[in-house]
Image (cartoon, rainbow, N blue to C red):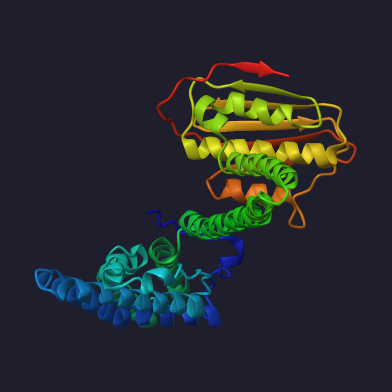
Amino acid sequence: MTMSPSLPDNDRPPPARFAFDRYTWKEIAYLLANLPMAVAGFVYAVFLVGVGAGLSVTVIGLPLLALGLTGARWLGRAERGRARGMLGLRVEEPSPMPRGLRGGGFFTWLWSGLRDPVGWRALLFSFMRLPWGIATFVVTLVGLFVLWPVLPFIARGLTNADRAMVRGLLSPSDELERRIAELESDRGVVVDTAAADLRRIERDLHDGAQARLVALAMGLGLAKEKLSDDPEAAARMVDEAHGEVKVALQELRDLARGIHPAVLTDRGLDAALSAIASRCTVPVTVSVQLTGRPAEAIEGIAYFTVSELLQNVSKHSRAASAAVDVWRSGDRLMLQVRDDGVGGASLEGGTGMSGLAERLGAVDGLFVLDSPEGGPTTVTAELPWRDRAGVPAKRVERA
């Protein structure tokens, strides 16, 4: 962990001067307060580690350690507040303990508490501060009586080291915090997408196949009643019911294909993408250049991404032609859909494009849209590549 004394421009204190200004007195007060704070933190850290480790063979040792790490978070917060108020150091607060883990039962809470990196870093900070607190207290106290002409410069050097320690051990990791925020957002997107898909399937079944099957049952019941009195009418009703069965079966096939097409499972992306390209109202050229098949989940996401993009081409682009390219680049599966239409597609306003971008982002994917007014439109998508056993896919080009 790097503890660099360099500070951003907006966090730099004013230059040190021989005159004792308000900022210098704050730095001196901070250095003198280091000793009591360091003693309290050191005693807490030693007591917690000693008692927690000593009692770890009992049922209360590990819970006590987990509670102590939560208390270490409060010590870290106090030190950040002290540095913010007396040194003008802007340090963001780390992420709190996840709420879901708090309500997940005793053992979930225990495990999350014991592996809390924020608590452990605050505990390390408290443990290592004692010699530094003694040194800064002694140097600052002596400087007030002996070295007072140059004390502002001494205080500035010592507090710069304090700033580095606070930033290094008590500030959140920017990359980690960003990743946590992304994962929390992506989890919500995945849950919302799954719920929307379930509602769509339920609606399609209720409004489509189920309604036809109910009508079929009623028609067959009426035909049964007329069978003895009016055989010809009963025959016509059975014939109509036969037609309804065919339509219901086709709707069920379409619904099953919308969930996961059989051609994708059996033959891979090349055949599956060629199948959806053949149903597009715009002539589409498909080029798949893969030496193997990705994992089923990645393959399915790639298929449905291209499917929705081609639906947009059919409905909105007014294009004369389109092209789909699929290839692998390192550990990424690349998709590109182009059309020569009118352009103007956007990710704003909750459009289908923004939904695709959110879905790809939920699996560490990337979605890039280039669609100027007047066209052409190019959509490039990336997905993480994960291998799976299967028949290698060859380069296939179809129009």
The x and y percentages for residue 241 are 68, 45
The residue shown at (84%, 42%) is: 316
Residue 110 falls in image quadrant: bottom left
Residue furthest toward the front? 229
Q: Nearer the viewer, residue 142 or 160?
A: 160
The x and y percentages for residue 280 are 76, 32
The x and y percentages for residue 143 are 37, 77
The residue shown at (48%, 36%) is: 296
Q: Is residue 13 above or below residue 359?
A: below
Viewport quadrant of the C terminus: top right
Q: Is residue 234 left or right of residue 113?
A: right
Q: Which of 43 and 142 is in front in this view?
A: 43
Q: In this view, does 333 lie to the left or right of 232?
A: left
Number of on-image labels: 0
Viewport quadrant of the N terminus: bottom left
The residue shown at (73%, 27%) is: 278
Q: Is residue 62 left or right of residue 320?
A: left
Is residue 168 at least partly visible in the picture?
yes
Q: Nearer the viewer, residue 177 or 338?
A: 338
The x and y percentages for residue 166 are 41, 67
